[in-house]
Image (tube, helix red, strand yellow):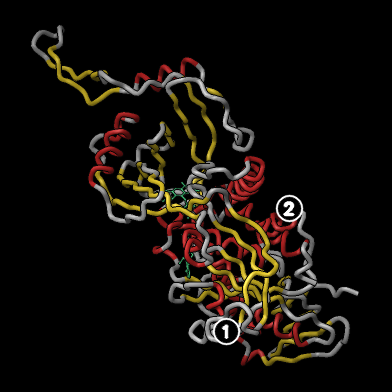
Amino acid sequence: MQLSKKISLRLNNSVFPILPQGASTIAEAIGTEVRFVPRRTRAITVIPLSTCIMHSVLTSSLSWRRRVQLFAHSTSRLASSLASNAPNAKPPLRVCVVGGGVVGLTSALRLLQLNHRTGIADNQANTDGVTQPRRPVEVTVLASSFGADTTTAGAAGLWGPYKLSDTPEHLINRWGAATYNHLFQLAHSGLADVAGVSMVSSNSLFPEPQELPFWSHIPLDFAVMDERTLTGLSQRAISGSERIQAATPPGSDCVVPRLDPNPFLCGWGYHWQSIVCEGSRYLPWLTEQVRALGGRLRRVSPLTSLEQLSCPEVDLREGDVDLVVNAAGLGSLELLPDPEVVPIRGQVVRVEAPWVKQAYFYEPYYIIPNRDTVVLGGTGQRGDFNLAVSQEDKRLILDGCCRLLPSLRGARVVADWVGLRPGRTSLRLELQREGVRLGGGRSGGPGGGGRVVPVVHNYGHGGAGLTLAWGCAGDVVRLIVEEGLME
Ligand SMILES: Cc1cc2nc3c(=O)[nH]c(=O)nc-3n(C[C@H](O)[C@H](O)[C@H](O)COP(=O)(O)OP(=O)(O)OC[C@H]3O[C@@H](n4cnc5c(N)ncnc54)[C@H](O)[C@@H]3O)c2cc1C
């Protein structure tokens, strides 16, 4: 019989529902103690509140929101350890996620959500057809860089399938739709501000009519532009203004726009509602979510192979990992190694232009408003590892974007940035059962003893990591559950 996974904690007459990792426990705070009562055995574990971290969390002077987050974190840890000690409890599935960008952290979060039901993400986790796991999940995220040092942090973060090479369209649609729906909910929730997610009206312009993009059914309000819109946008193709002598009153000057002698031809286009999920804001939010659900994050020196996970320096011993999720992005080129991985260099200029509220695309240029700056792009140099800012690229970007949207002229440049998109012939999301040998000597290696653990690969998201991460992470979870790895 599978045990119920629900516990609730009653504290000072407030009941907090908690879904611990496989626990069948009811927690009650009575006076100065918390009682955990496994439903099956009726045995009672008593933890004095004075020594209980939850007590200090709940009575601290932190904001209520922070208190609830810390509370969820502490109780899940506590409940998890109680659960794994409970009679007949299944041992946890210990997952090591390699990669601390949007792909790794989202994979970690969705795995941890199998243990908990909280907020928005909870509904999502269960509407994708993933059934509840049999085992609790423990997650450790290892990465050579977190936060600002990742590619994710520099991305403008607009939802839109981009530079995904031969990744099958039906998969892009599946992952893209799940991510769009998730971000749409976030953008309309009370978390939008802290997660850096907002709706952005977007205009894609072309010289001539095109086929509709294969993903056109996903974003809201997708519509081919009518003549009036196209004419309006074309008339904006002006460069600066000129001062002319007005006829009346005699002698006075007036300023009129001057038409660009060589405007971008906007013969066709479509309008759609996109969503911006700013990498630099979304990552800290994701990190907080992972931590709140009991996930651990550890910075390590860049690994040269997955076998290194069992090295003493990494300190994840053989017995500490049952499954690896490889979300190392471009790092997979050397980590596996995977020769199909290729950098796609992207340079952008961030300018201060708070009057720009919509996104514009005209290959190869794009204009994407973020909260404090507007991101102007871009380049897509395949196979180029150069992270230095190119002045020539910068000039082309500024010229092109100002022609596309002349209101940008004179906007103050705030920052230049270059990132390497993790390109691949096709995004790789698959389970490798004989994934990696851990514990076979200092560097692991074939035939060297130890234990072979499965690896779920999730990398090669090109120019669309933020566009697909949520949906891809859903499939990581599905693979793990459906392939029986939770049994
Ligand atoms: C200019 C530019 C603009 C972009 N704009 C958008 C956009 O608007 N919308 C969008 O959806 N996408 C955009 N992207 C693409 C997006 O940034 C990427 O697809 C996404 O960041 C990939 O996420 P990731 O987690 O796979 O990789 P990363 O963010 O690069 O994270 C990789 C992680 O793996 C770790 N790692 C790698 N190798 C190792 C190793 N050997 N050992 C240990 N750890 C390792 C790293 O330390 C890091 O933590 C843009 C990219 C660029 C360059």
* Mark 2 crowdedness (10 Å alpha carbons): few <14, some 14-19, many ≥20: some
Q: Could you tell whether 130 is left or right of 372 in the image? A: right
Residue 337 is marked as none
How far across and how far down the image is residue 481, in percent?
76, 64
How far across and how far down the image is residue 33, in percent?
70, 90
* Image quadrant occupied by the N terminus: bottom right
How far across and how far down the image is residue 123, in percent?
71, 56
- Quarter of the rendering containing residue 214: top right
Determine the residue located farthest toward the front in the rendered image. Answer: 447
Look at 53% across and 39% down and name the residue there: 274
- Quarter of the rendering containing residue 117: bottom right
> Which residue was labeled with disc 1?
56
> Which residue was labeled with disc 2?
128
* Mark 1 crowdedness (10 Å alpha carbons): few <14, some 14-19, many ≥20: some
Look at 46% across and 53% down and name the residue there: 342
Mark 1 secondary-structure assignment: helix
Determine the residue located farthest toward the right in the rendered image. Answer: 1
The answer to whether marks 1 and 2 mark residues whose Cβ atoms lie closer than 8 Å is no
